[in-house]
Image (cartoon, rainbow, N blue to C red):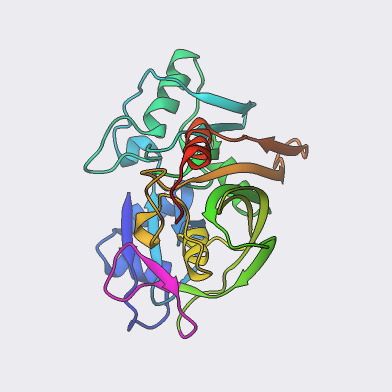
Amino acid sequence: MYNFYIPLDHPDVSLRDWIRKNGISLTQWRKIKAQGIIKINNLISKHDSILHPGDNINISLPLKENYNLQPQNDTLNILFEDNYLLIVSKPSNMLVHPTCNQLNNTLGNIIMGYYQRNGVNAMFHPVSRLDKNTSGIIIIAKTPQIQHLLSNKKINKSYLAIMPISKGFVSEFVDKPIARKQGSIIEREVNEQIGKSAQTKFTLLANYKNYGLMNISIFTGRTHQIRVHAAYIGMPLLGDDLYGGNCYFSNTQLLHAHSIEFIHPITKQLINIRDYLPEHFKIAIEKIKRSSHVF
């Protein structure tokens, strides 16, 4: 996998020119064009994309070209599968991809183990990615071609979260641009000057004292979008210590990708998947109900 960051003072540049300038050979570039998965700011992108200041680029090649993704025998919660797609529910506290610091116990390892046990001739091509501590639905394409087809399809996504609420809160639509926070390689912030457009809608489903179970719809796909917008409106996700969330009831952010809807790129079938409230949400809700603390 190749990872790049475009400095804020760098002019717009084509993806090809940037990676060629950064040591990738012409032969490797051809492999990337033919087989690679290109993500710009976590969104699937094309090889002829133009890069802008502040962009994060992740490029992965098929596993034999990339890293040795060791199959692992572990529980896999499958929500949908056919010859082209595998849709699963990722638990909280699990990486999607191996990293140089963690080669095993990732969703990729477990899926490759599932393929191996069941004689599935496929590879690991996640169409989208979730933070380590975000649970819920992930779509896996079984070939790069299917992943590419899905990258051009509209996928409606919604999430569940537990957030602090004020009396009378019903819903709020947030339309505020997001950018990398100055001086941080991880944190994002609302930034009217250099941020990229981002829209999120928060809708209350149920309340528990001064916390609410929220349905969240996103209309763009910026890094940490939900977490940044929640903090911006003064309602940081429960357990999200990076953005000021209360960690009394949960030591991990309570964000769950609970629904997706899209047209299957091959069968043209409407795929509508739901993955309802996970156990760690239920535990936090019970703690809130029993607690005499007010935050």
Q: Does residue 155 show up?
A: no
Residue 6: % across, % down: 34, 72
Residue depicted at x 45% and y 33%: 91
Residue depicted at x 40% and y 21%: 113
Residue 78 as seen in the image, left or right of residue 125: right
Q: Nearer the viewer, residue 32 or 72?
A: 72
Residue 118 as seen in the image, left or right of residue 69: right
> Going by the picture, which residue comes out furthest to the right?
269
Vertical relation: 61 (above or below) 229:
above
Residue 55: % across, % down: 41, 69
Vertical relation: 75 (above or below) 188:
above
Residue depicted at x 41% and y 52%: 32
Residue 260 as seen in the image, left or right of residue 104: right
> What segment is highlighted magenta in the picture?
179-193
Q: Nearer the viewer, residue 2 or 171?
A: 171
Residue 40: % across, % down: 45, 62
**Of helix, strand and loop, which mostly describes the magenta segment?**
loop
Q: Does residue 167 show up?
A: yes
Residue 62: % across, % down: 40, 39
Residue depicted at x 41% and y 49%: 239
Q: Quadrant location of residue 166?
A: bottom right
Residue 57 as seen in the image, left or right of residue 285: left
